[in-house]
Amino acid sequence: MTDLLFLADFSVIRPEPGLFVWTVLIFSVFWWLMAKYAFKPIQQALKAREDDIQNSLDEAKRAREEMANLNAENEKLLAQASEERAKILKEAKEAKQAIIAEAKEKAKEEAKKIVANAKNDIENLRMAAVTDLKNQVGNISIEIAEKILREQLSGDAAKEGYVKSLVDEIKLN
C-alpha cells in the first residue's frame, strides 16, 4: 500500500526531480535513436518523394512542351498538306483544261479534214456527173446526128459509098 500511497501523492504539475531526470534521459535517448534510425530515413524518403514529384512535374512540363511542339508541327504539316493538295488540284485542273483544249483542237482539225475530204468527194462526184452528162449529151448528139444523116443519106448510092469510105477510114485510124 505504500506504493499506492506514493502514486496517490504523485502530481503532474509538481514532478519529482528523479522522475524529471529519468524522463529527460529517456526522452533524450529516444530522440537520439529516432534521429539516428528514423529521422534520416524519413527525411531521405521525403527528399526522394520531393525529387520524384519534382521530376514528374518537370517531365509533365516537358511532355506539355513536346505536345505543343507536336501540335505546332502537325498544324504546319496540315498547312503544307493543304498547300500540296491545292497545288495538285490546280495542276490537275490545268492538265484537264490542256487535254480538253487539245481534244477540241484535234476535233477541229479532224472536222476540217472531214469537210475538206467531203468537198473533194463532192467535187469529184460533180466532175464525174458533168463528165457523164457530157458523155450522154455527146451520145445523144451522135444518135441525133446519125438519124439526121441516115435520113439525108438514105436512098442515094453515091452518098452511101461516101459514108462507107469514111467509116472505113475511121476504123483504120
Image: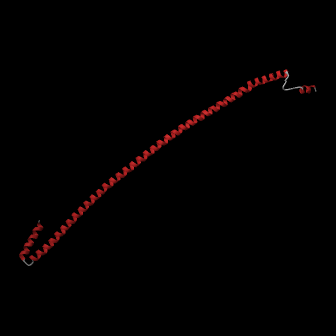
Horizontal side of 124 relative to 92 (left or right) equals: left
Residue at image coords 17%, 70%: 139
The relative height of residue 37 versus residue 173 in the rendered view (above or below) is above
The relative height of residue 73 versus residue 139 in the rendered view (above or below) is above
Residue 125 on image: x %, y %: 24, 64
Task: Spot the residue most to the front.
Answer: 13
Residue at image coords 55%, 36%: 66
Horizontal side of 30 relative to 47 (left or right) equals: right
Viewer-proximal residue among 101 and 128: 101
The relative height of residue 112 versus residue 34 in the rendered view (above or below) is below
Residue 134 on image: x %, y %: 18, 67
Residue 64 on image: x %, y %: 57, 37
Q: Please identify the quarter of the rendering in which residue 87 is found.
A: top left
The relative height of residue 166 versus residue 113 in the rendered view (above or below) is below
Viewer-proximal residue among 56 and 172: 56
Q: Please identify the quarter of the rendering in which residue 107 is found.
A: bottom left
